[in-house]
Image: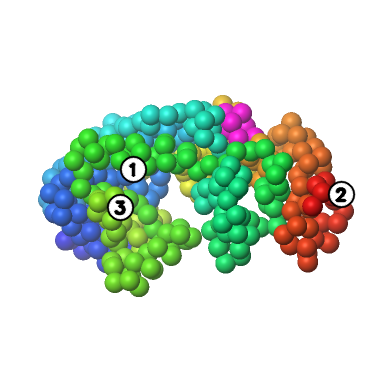
Amino acid sequence: MTCIKEMSKELNTKIVNAMERIEQLVRMTDGKCYLSFSGGKDSTVVLALIKMCQDIYTIRPYSIPAVYSETGLELGATSRFVRFIKDTYYPNIHMIRPNYSFHYIIENFGKPIKSKMRSEYLFRYHSKNSQSALSNLLDPKQKKIYIANKDLHMLHPDFKIQCTNKCCLYLKKKPFDTYSKNNDILGYLTGLRMAEGGARTMNALNRVKNGGRLCMTASKGKTVIMPIIDWTNQDIEDFISYYNVPLSEAYTEYHCKRTGCFLCPYSLNLKEDLSVLYYNEPNRYTAAIHWLKDVYIAQNVILPFDFTYERERIKKWADEYDKMRYDMMLKYRPNIASKYSNCQLSLDL
């Protein structure tokens, strides 16, 4: 491979390793593989690395399809970018679609709230009265599931939102499973990185600890390669700058940190995400509020730019959620309930 000049030796090594990981998956699957492409920064970097492999003839031109699931919840900027990539940068883009719309999912299964794991355990508790689920929700050792003090109202029997994590399953996982089955896929590439933190880091470290490989895992009988698993945020920025990798307006104009479903309440930057929508894509902001306003209010997301929403949030908390939270504090964490003593008891415990 040609030497990459004007770049740190460490990043140069990471680029070479990433390209070799891509080439390895092609060999392992005899080319029956794809890139899971979101239009986001990381998967676009992997696409650029695929093109670099093509340039040195280690894989056939455009032989790896970049598969993009049109969920209906993408930013307009993301949709435009994916079509730009298909027209000008990498023609082998496959568009797939889920069988269910987001509207159908929330009407028939429930709504996402807080995180995937918390949504699932709240569903088990409220719909099935699972005491095991409740124990996990109250156990601080269960970091992915634990309900913080500020969210204890979500355990109240009068909490009305039906929670579920089914949106990710039906909008993303199942369409890719169907694509894999229909195309005899044996493996795929993702832009997943440890630097994103959380479960990604823990899973990667556990793989290595148990004798596995940092960049490789398996899912439903498919080999999964993560070419940039060990890249830092700075590595990504340096690579994009040096190779002039195209990016969505979501990054260049909206200054988003991440892209994804525009209304997702799992986001750690939800307030900022909704602000971006409000000022840049108001129709999508309207859709987000239409579908998930009750979830945002339950998560106490403050949106100072939306006075109508703010009036409703403040009233909901004053009339219901403050009292419900205090009830649950008295029941499950009475030693610190005094912090919420300004609230009135609303449930006979």
Q: Are marks 2 and 3 in contact (CB under 8 Å)?
A: no
Can the viewer see residue 253 in this picture? no
| Neighbourhood count class around disc 2 (C-alpha, 10 Å): few under 14, some 14–19, many 20 upward | few
The image's mark for residue 219 is 3
Is residue 344 toward the left or the right of residue 194 in the image?
Answer: right
Q: Nearer the viewer, residue 140 or 216?
A: 140
Question: Does residue 27 show up magenta in the picture?
Answer: no
Disc on the earlier residue, 1 or 2: 1
Which residue: 23% across, 59% down? 21
Which amino acid does the dot numbered 3 rest on?
Answer: Ser
| Neighbourhood count class around disc 1 (C-alpha, 10 Å): few under 14, some 14–19, many 20 upward | many
- Residue 166 x/y as whole percent: 47, 40
Separation (CA) of disc 3 from disc 1? 17 Å
- Residue 53 x/y as whole percent: 19, 52
Which residue: 66% across, 57% down? 148
Above or below 94: residue 210: below
**Magenta-colored span:** 287-293
Disc on the earlier residue, 2 or 3: 3
Is residue 207 toward the left or the right of residue 105 in the image?
Answer: left
